[in-house]
Image: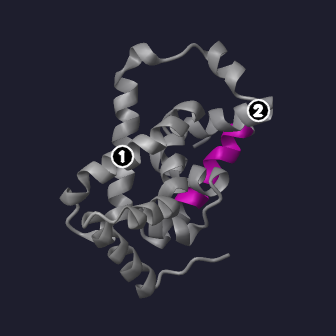
Amino acid sequence: MAVSITPELDSTEAELVWASKAGDRSAFGQLYERYARMVHGVLLAHVSYADAEDLVQDVFLRALEQLESLRAPGAFGGWLVAIARRAATDLHRKAWRIRPINDIARTVTANSEGFAIMGALRKLPDTYRETLILRLLEGMTGPEIAIRTGLKPDSVRVNLCRGMKLLRSALEGKTDE
């Protein structure tokens, strides 16, 4: 299903943000439904799967607490991405909480090909990694990624194209580029 950028989507989203600022928890719940996959994908680009699962809720709690600081309701998606990135950075600052790889391997039931792909994704530059994870793992379309993150559709298209090229090279064991 293709998602188009329409004024109705933007005005509806702005209305949800304004209602959330006014204390309407149902409106904030609708924002959560719209953005949870995106937040999960951004987090997954920076932290382990288990940590991403935990941090999604934290990101939305932080957003709810800081909602009054959001001046432009149309910027909600980009603002939320920034909060997610900060949450991932904060987690990395707590280095003592990092679990040994053996603990992670016991909690994740994935095949070795999946681990190889995720490992290759994690080595890509942030811009490509986030966009590819949103597309490949979270199932978001290019236009949907643009709408939710605040990126321009052409930027998303370029990031996906270049990211896929780098990912293919990494998975084929090539070192060019």
Answer above or below: position of 61 versus 69. above
**Residue visible at 71% across and 19% down in the picture:** 106
Within-10-Å neighbours for mark 2: few <14, some 14–19, many 20+:
few
**Which callout, 1 or 2, points at the residue further toward the start of the chain?**
1
Label 1 or label 2, whichever lies nearer to me, is 1
Alpha carbon distance from label 1 to label 2:
30 Å
Inspect this view and state whether residue 62 appears: yes
Please give the residue where the numbered disc 1 appears in the rendered image: 61
Using the image as rendered, state which of residue 171 and residue 14 is in the foreground: 14
Q: In this view, does 135 lie above or below 129?
A: below
Please state which amino acid type lies under the numbered disc 1: Leu
Give the magenta part as a residue range: 159-171
Q: Of the numbered discs in the image, which one, if any, rests on residue 110? A: 2
Q: Can you say which quadrant of the picture contains the C terminus?
A: top right
Please provide percent x and percent y for residue 132: 59, 52
Question: Are there few (<14), some (14-19), or many (20+) residues within 10 Å of tag 1?
Answer: few
The residue shown at (71%, 31%) is 115
Q: Which amino acid does label 2 sit on?
A: Ala
Quarter of the image where the N terminus is located: bottom right
Residue at image position (20%, 59%) is: 68
* Predominant SS along the magenta part: helix
Magenta run includes residue 23: no
